[in-house]
Image (cartoon, coloured by chain):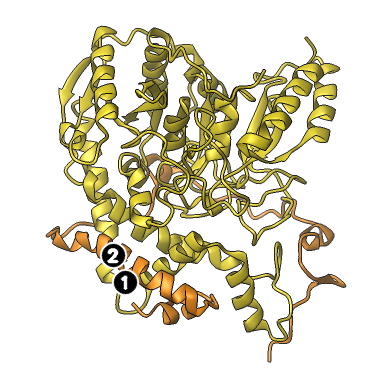
Amino acid sequence: MDVRQVAKLAHLEITDDEVALYTPQMANIVKYVEQLNELDIGEIEPMLGGLTTEGKATNSIREDIAGESFAQKDALREAPSGVAGHFQVPKVL
Amino acid sequence: MSIVSEIEKTLDHAETLNGELNSFLSIESESSLSRAQLLDTTETVGPLKGVAIAVKDNICTKDMRTSCGSRILGNYKAQYDATAISRLNDAGAIVVGKTNMDEFAMGSSNESSAFGPAKNPWDVARVPGGSSGGSAVAVASGVVRAALGSETGGSVRQPASLCGIVGFKPTYGRISRYGLVAFASSLDNIGIFGQTSKDVADVLGVIAGRDEKDSTSADVPVPDYAATLNDDIAGKTIGIPRALLGEGLDDEVRESVLASIDNFKALGANTVDIELPYAKYGIAVYYIIATAEASSNLARYDGVRYGFRAEDSPELRQMYFKTREEGFGPEVKRRIMLGTYVLSSGYYDAYYSKAQKVRALVKRDYETAFTKCDAILTPTSPTTAFKIGEKSDDPIAMYLSDIYTVSANLAGVPAISVPSGLSSEGLPIGVQLIGNFWSEATLLNLTHKYETAHPLNARPSVFAG
């Protein structure tokens, strides 16, 4: 695995030391999970999520009526840089 | 005794022990005392009126710190309560503090916390287990009767086992996940620690049930769990997957588990041998599915809307990269990268799709087993608490701590760990019971009867009071 390339896809700016640390560790983990390749499992429907039969049957549709939501002030409260009702970020281009 | 004086005592214990145990990341003295005062002066009687609860730091508690054990959330204060928290509050419980955890619940020892590990009160040189280690320690050290944790692959049951208390994971969909910070959404659950099964039953009765804010919470009636704790267990059938009691299992843990089987028989239960042929692939399936979901869920930490932002980034993309580089610890980075890799173009079928198919087979194993038994008994953890630092350089050795617990998360079935004894070194050993979907009442009945007949009769060396 090219750890540097994967880190880039994951939006992580990793250092040379980290590349040296993670490369053998990740290779071992990948080797471990590849034990699934020894299984000949044929035609099995993949399990997509954790929902039980009862969970799948539970109706999650509600009336389209606006409910409570955060006030702008509250939504911005935890932002590293909230300015004039906006999340401020460094320049994009 | 007034609720205020009880809570003062709890807060005092929490403060006093925290220097040694590091189980709390924040202790909420002010809000706890004002709630206690209010409860002392109201006549309303909630089922948990005045009960102090500790809460894992990845469950949102309005205006309280919710760090997930991570530098990237830093001093983040949640803007709303998780549904489990608002239900606890409505029942009269008091959240006294937020507990230490492996960063984003990724770990089995608490060592990946950005704020240093919580310590095991039975031996402070050892880990409490993880990822909900702080909550386990808060209960085991006698500070609180019950605590909330979260489970993705065993993060409540394994630390409960290592700390000598009860740890419970519900059926997927039993407890709303609204306000539980997402790690791997198809596996995550809120779980409960208690000094006893009754403590777990009392909390579960309050927080279980359908919540419109979590579309995966199921509309299944919530029984009175406390009412059936004392039911006779004669005639219940316990399945024993003997093939799982072999290689890799510590000898003393095996002996304790075999003794617990005899104890259940003495209480009138029957046993039957069963097989879970795909259980051994659980860890491999888990590390594909959990990391894939995590790589997606953790994309939201980018330094824009909350938490930490790296300084000195003149440009947006660079700000994302630096924030995530400086904000996440090594275990979280490893898992995000593994998840990114298994989902990347050309690898999806080989890893993710295959893992989902084996996950279906793990679930089928349980469905077959439960045609023959009411619950399945296994060890909770293959070993007792290990030393701090012992496994921290070897991710796979750490992952294998969860070998007995992950498959219940993959299948979605409920499970519970109850103390079964102490090792020759005086460390707790836990035994796990796994139940069929929605059979929480049966599990709690079995463990209540067990712990009543076979109490641990020992306290950790660090204990409140």
Identify the secondary structure beneath mark 1.
Answer: loop
Colour chain B appears in: yellow
Q: Quadrant of residue B83?
A: top right
> Three-letter amino acid code at disc 2?
Ser
Residue at 48% across, 60% down:
B331
Instruction: Report whether B422 appears left or right of B269.
Output: right
The residue at which mark 1 appears reads as: B348
Q: Is residue B267 above or below residue B112?
A: above
Residue at 61% across, 35% down:
B21
The residue at which mark 2 appears reads as: B353
**Label 2 or label 1, whichever comes before in sequence order:** 1
> Three-letter amino acid code at disc 1?
Tyr
**Residues at circles 2 and 1 in contact by the CB criterion of under 8 Å:** yes
- Comparing B38 with B24, the one in front is B24
Q: Is residue B207 visible?
A: no
Instruction: Report whether B300 appears left or right of A44.
Output: right
Instruction: Report whether B295 appears left or right of B400.
Output: right
Answer yes or no: are tags 2 and 1 on the same subunit: yes
Q: Which chain is orange?
A: A
Q: Quadrant of residue B71?
A: bottom right
Chain containing mark 1: B
- Comparing A62 with A40, the one in front is A40
Q: How many marks?
A: 2
Chain containing mark 2: B
